[in-house]
Amino acid sequence: MLRRSIVLVAVMTLLVVFAVPAAADAPVTFEDELYEWENAIHPLSGFCGFDIHETGYERVVVKGYTDSDGGEDRLQIHVRGQNKMWTDAGVTAFDRYAFLVVVDPVAQTETYKGNDWNLHAPGTGSGISVNDSGVLSFTWDGEVVKLAGPRDTFAESWPQDFCDALTP
């Protein structure tokens, strides 16, 4: 899925963002795209052992900021989207998400704020099968600096919980 490749987009955009002069802390929008997909096979299909089809969309807005000296300050990536997922057995689930990624090239960190996963499947009690929201901040070396909120994708049972939500 596209949101999992945001880091690559961010790093590639960093090469362009700070080559363009801008007023101090004035955002420069480098990308405002709507991505859509239809009847794609979800990447976790292999793990689950059955095909998971998905149709969805995602809007990605990338903005770059500079400091008062015109040096690189930060990159912000706003992501909002939703997926409809279904199996050949007739189970359907929905994933709606909205989050912000802040890339700080000076501190060499990335911070995700918001709701990365919010998977709803019928018949799962509360209706929420996977909830990954709050704040996640890590260094470019992979060290987690901050982890707050329900982060189901960090649980030992992930991604089996995802598969279970789509099992009849």
Image (spheres, helix red, strand yellow):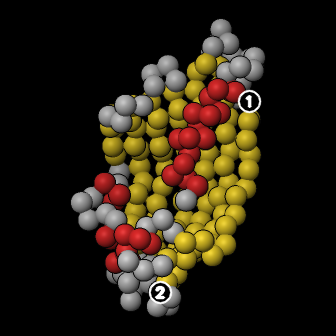
Q: Is residue 27 left or right of residue 106?
A: right
Q: Which residue does the image show at 55% across and 65% down from the upper left?
A: 96
Between the residue at mark 2 and the residue at mark 1, the CA separation in whole angstroms equals 43 Å
Where residue 13 sits in the image (x, y, percent)?
A: 65, 33
Displayed quadrant of residue 168: bottom left
> Is residue 37 placed above or below 132 in the rendered structure?
below
Q: Which residue does the image show at 46% across and 38% down from the upper left?
A: 111
Secondary structure state at the residue bearing disc 1: strand
Displayed quadrant of residue 17: top right
The disc, 2 or 1, on the residue closer to the chain's N-terminal end is 1
Where residue 59 sits in the image (x, y, percent)?
A: 68, 54
Q: Is residue 84 left or right of residue 114?
A: right
Q: Can residue 140 be seen in this snapshot?
A: yes
Q: Which residue does the image show at 71% across and 24% down from the upper left?
A: 26
- For the residue marked with disc 1, what is the amino acid? Val
Q: Is residue 167 left or right of residue 79?
A: left
- For the residue marked with disc 2, what is the amino acid? Val
Asked whether disc 2 touches disc 1, contact meaning CB atoms under 8 Å apart, the reply is: no
Secondary structure state at the residue bearing disc 2: loop
> Is residue 113 placed above or below 161 in the rendered structure?
above
**Residue nearest the observer in this picture, 47 or 167:** 47
Classify mark 2: residues with Cα within 10 Å, few (<14), some (14-19) or many (20+): some
The numbered dot on residue 43 is: none
Find disc 2 in the rendering and name its residue: 91
Classify mark 1: residues with Cα within 10 Å, few (<14), some (14-19) or many (20+): some
Find disc 1 in the rendering and name its residue: 28
Q: Quadrant of the N terminus?
A: bottom right
Closest to the camera, between mark 2 and mark 1, is 2
Where residue 50 sits in the image (x, y, percent)?
A: 42, 80
